Image (cartoon, coloured by chain):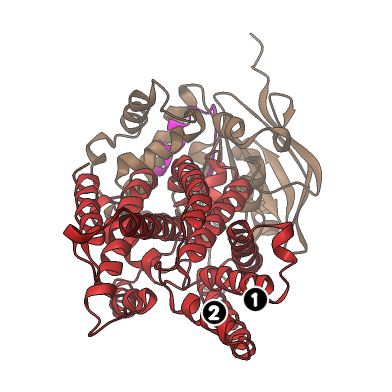
Chain colours: A red, B brown
Amino acid sequence: MRMILGASLLLAVAAAASLMTGPVGWSDLDHQLLLLRLVRLLAGILAGAALAVAGVLMQGLFRNPLASPSVTGVSAGAALGVELALMGSVLMPGLLTILPAACLRPAAGCAGAALALGCLLAVARRRGDITSVVLLGMVLSMLFSALGAYLLSLANDRWELGRILVTFTLGGIDTATGRSVAVATPLVAVALGASWCWGRTLDVALSGEREAASLGVDTVAMMRWALVWTAVLAAAAVTLGGGIGFVGLIVPNVLRAYLGPGHRQLIVACALGGAAFLTAADVCARVLHPGPGEIPLGAITSLVGAPFFIWFFTRERAAGRL
Amino acid sequence: MNAPGPVLTIEALSVVRAGREVLHGISLSLRAGQVQVLIGPNGSGKSSLAMAACGLLPPAAGAVTVGGVAITRLAPRMRARLVAYVPQRSELGSGLSVEQVVAMGRFAHDGAWGRDASHHQAIREALMQVDALELARRPFTELSGGETQRVLIARALATSASILILDEPSSALDVAHRLGILRLLRRLAGAGKAVLVALHDLTEATQLADQVVLLHAGRILAQGSPQEVISPGNVRSAYGVTLLPGAGYGYALDGC
């Protein structure tokens, strides 16, 4: 409970800083600017909560603390889906008559994330060892990123499209709109609620697939639904913020060290902690850049996340847990 | 007085794992209050039979029935309330207390939103039954081998299932802990549980079993009372070793 209160407090502080940070001071802020900052804040809260809880689901499912949407290629899959949707909506505007842009992007993101997760699941079922799954995840991540880079090179022929894709790839919630937040909010809310409901099942699954089945877990349903909700969360986060990595790795692992492995309270704490972390990172992206402009949010989270990943991997390896 | 009817029945069961038939036409029945021991050399199919009896391996032919219902037709939660499984070793990682591990046994009784009213009492009783109440707050991964097995049995007891299936629960333990586990299983059978347990040690099997099933290459070589089954001829056929006459179940080392 203390940890959840602490995460709530951090989120409140980060949210206040986010609303007050920008080229225009708080006292000069008009209604329009405040609304823009509010949309940006909400996008950060949603994306951070979604990424952190997606990390909890993946780590619980694969019983590996190194699993996360970014490490296992899920975020890259979702990003590729959104990039294809962005290109499609520019090159084939007719697409938008079938599905509005605010819905097309999350749908494409879900499809990309589901593709990555489907590959992971197939390997997990065939080989059963976590190392293979994590290695495949990294390969998928590189593959989807390479395909994304190829799309980017194609998009460079059209300046505006190239700019949209570059901005998306670098990651950031500054481009989030009220409509994208409105579409993402129910997706994230439902997926967070569903994830919490699967928490006890994931607790039992810590004992391995066979033991969990003997204790009454429908392991096939658990795997399927955990993957579905991970895909929804990752897709919503990518739609809002583009290529933001490592949130799903850092936040759950830090909070698990204090809270233990119980998934229900971890999911609540990670939703708050992830939201606080990404909001704070977004404030840093605005204030740490020398001169006008911003540091891409994805760069900030990766600058924190990459050393954390190495430190954490080394520690777990030394402890014989990996 | 008539003996109670079987609570678990296995009929002409065949199981295929990784494309290979590991059990062929196995039939047995287990009654409440009875301890039935599976013995046989490595690879004879004891673990596969234990898992199939819990519904963790699907039958390629034949059936496992609990109270007359095919185990494969039971929903996972219902199955867990009827049949509890104790693995040879657990894959549980760090971070969980003994109490949390035993609480997993109540999963099949949990509602969607809250715990069953008897949750804490059931955990406490399960721990008491295996004399492990004092371990409740200890981290599971810091337990000794004997304590770990007792806690895994407590988790199985917390399911309130009337059928207990254990896969070599004493194989990694010293003699004192092994005897402790055997006494516990006898006590549980005395309390009305039906116990099916895979064991390696023939002396332990003799001490514990009401019925013994000797497996060899996935088939039943013999089944019946311990004295009938653990005979020099059966042991030579199954294990390829000679029992020393008049030395309990000591074995002769070829060439010595």
Q: Is residue B72 in view from this perspective?
A: yes
Residue type pointed to by label 1? Met
What is the distance, in whole Å, between disc 2 and disc 1 at their CAs?
8 Å
**Of the pair B250 and B87, the residue shown nearer to us:** B87
Q: What range is drawn magenta here?
A: B152-167
Q: Which residue is mark 1?
A: A87
At x 66%, y 11%, the residue is: B2
A296 left or right of B81 in image: left
Q: Position of residue A196 (x, y in %)?
A: 44, 43
Report which residue position mark 2 lands on: A165
Using the image, name the chain to which the residue with label 1 belongs.
A
Q: Does B53 sit left or right of A56 as displayed?
A: right
Verify whether residue A181 appears in magenta: no
Q: Which mark is residue B72?
A: none
> Residue B163 location in percent, x, y?
56, 31
Residue B201, image x and y in percent? 50, 51
